[in-house]
Amino acid sequence: MSEAKTCGARVRRRDDHRDPKAGGATDRERRAAADVLSAPVAVAPRRWKFSELLAPPEVRERWEKVRKYFFLRESTYDMTNRCNLRCDGCYYYEGEKQFARENDDPEAWRDLMRREKARGITYVVLAGAEPSLVPERLAVCFAEAPLGCIATNGVRRIDPAVGYRIHISVWGNDATSLRVRKAKGLLGRQIDNYAGDPRAVFVYTFTRENVGECAGVMDTLAAAGCRATFNVFSAPVGYTGPLRHDAASLARTRDVMSGMMDRHPGHVLFSPYNAVAHTEVQGLHDLYRCAYPRRNPSTALGLGRSFRQFRADLTWDRDVACCVPDTDCDDCRHYAAGSAVVTARLYRHATDPGTFRAWLDYVDTYLAVWVMGYEKGETLCQEMIAPPDPLPARKP
Amino acid sequence: MPERMDTQALILRIATIMIEELKLEDVTPETFDPDMDLVDELGVDSMDLATVALVLQDEYGVFIDEDDYPTLKTLRLIAEYLQKKLHS
């Protein structure tokens, strides 16, 4: 099989899928043979039926496993304006949302959760600035909306009665955390608070500067029995600082992600296709066409219809609504964005066995990262499959 | 597939696929209202429609553009869409 280099990792080309019914030859090989034998012979890539893609038992089983969660409809909520850290490149302290007047009435939050449920929201993401500072609001939300996730810096432990997934942000080793987040001994405090907690998933954010620190951090997390997934720093609008990725740092990030999956298979929640989707030079929007309202004018279906990003004053603005507001969309490779944007592109991935398996791995990973009680299965596609061809511009 | 499928028969077939794929309860192909709004009244979303579109694509050999999903709001509209594709 021929392979192309993208971002330093081996990626199988879209037109290179090996057809087992054609004696193992790839489309490209068959095309080359046709060129030799006769002049203008065009060999169209095989069109796989969906039923053929689902035929292998392990694929069918995984499809049935993940589709049970297609009912999830998310929205996100800034819980407070306050934070106990001040990190370089923080999304929250960009744009207008940081100036929203915080609503501190628990009953207003309860009412919001009930209204969200009534309009079909089944999954809540409680984020900005630091949710652990408002435990009473977390309890109210959990009482009304039982499926969700809290994004926290992990400095304060969240009441175990709040049964959401908890994502603990890690931005490098302790020396880097001290420099970028002004927090001393942060990883140890995070582990003290969340080791052994079934809710916890540590989220290692790769920046341009900390790629080489991941192995050490992952060794520490794995030794403590903690599970982790990976995020890729996505610059806020206007950010030009040293954390912003370039092509070389993305390539290194992909290599390290791949190495960590091999080194800590029981502790890393990730797949080869996750690594591809989040480390291409093109961002998620260019690759998959972002479905969040900020980049999607349609209100007919999916995220464009149901997603809202509430500020701490319980208002929302469609023009800035996405999972990580004030991110530069051209640079967005955020794990939360990908979880929705890549997953939503089922149709684009139902093209051939490798691409479909890779997509199933991605969805399986996203569910394990975000949904309490969901366990990730074995990786179905170990190859780094290239993303589908980018979608054309939206129809007016 | 017949040369020109009757709209009613096509609606029944789409209803059957939708019931099977989305595991709908308390409805049969015969009782499925062909004009029911699938999104507003049935709660169908983009992933559901993508699944049904892939099965319909298998069965009828037509390409259903993702950007057309929002227009496929009822069984009747899906049937008309398929008929147009089949005879274009």
Image (cartoon, rainbow, N blue to C red):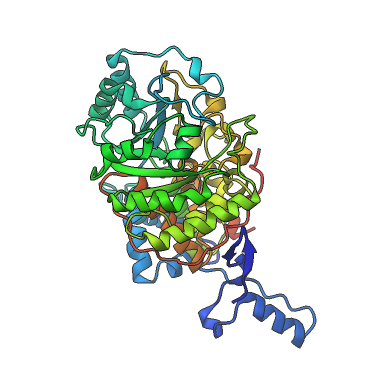
- Residue farthest to the left, as pictured: A161
Residue at horizontal 61%, vertical 66%?
A: A13
Quadrant housing the N terminus of chain A: bottom right
Residue at horizontal 58%, vertical 39%?
A: A243
Q: Position of residue A145 (x, y in %)?
A: 28, 31
Depicted A356 relative to depicted B84: above or below: below
Q: Position of residue A101 (x, y in %)?
A: 44, 12
Using residue A391 as the reference point, say whether residue A84 is left or right of it. Answer: left
Using residue A81 as the reference point, say whether residue A164 is left or right of it. Answer: left
Q: Between A311 and A174, which is closer to the camera in this rendering?
A: A174
Depicted A92 relative to depicted A223: above or below: above
Quadrant housing the C terminus of chain A: top right
Q: Position of residue A351 (x, y in %)?
A: 53, 63
- Residue farthest to the bottom, as pictured: A37
* Res. A106 image quadrant: top left
Using residue A75 as the reference point, say whether residue A334 is left or right of it. Answer: right
Q: Position of residue B26 (x, y in %)?
A: 25, 46
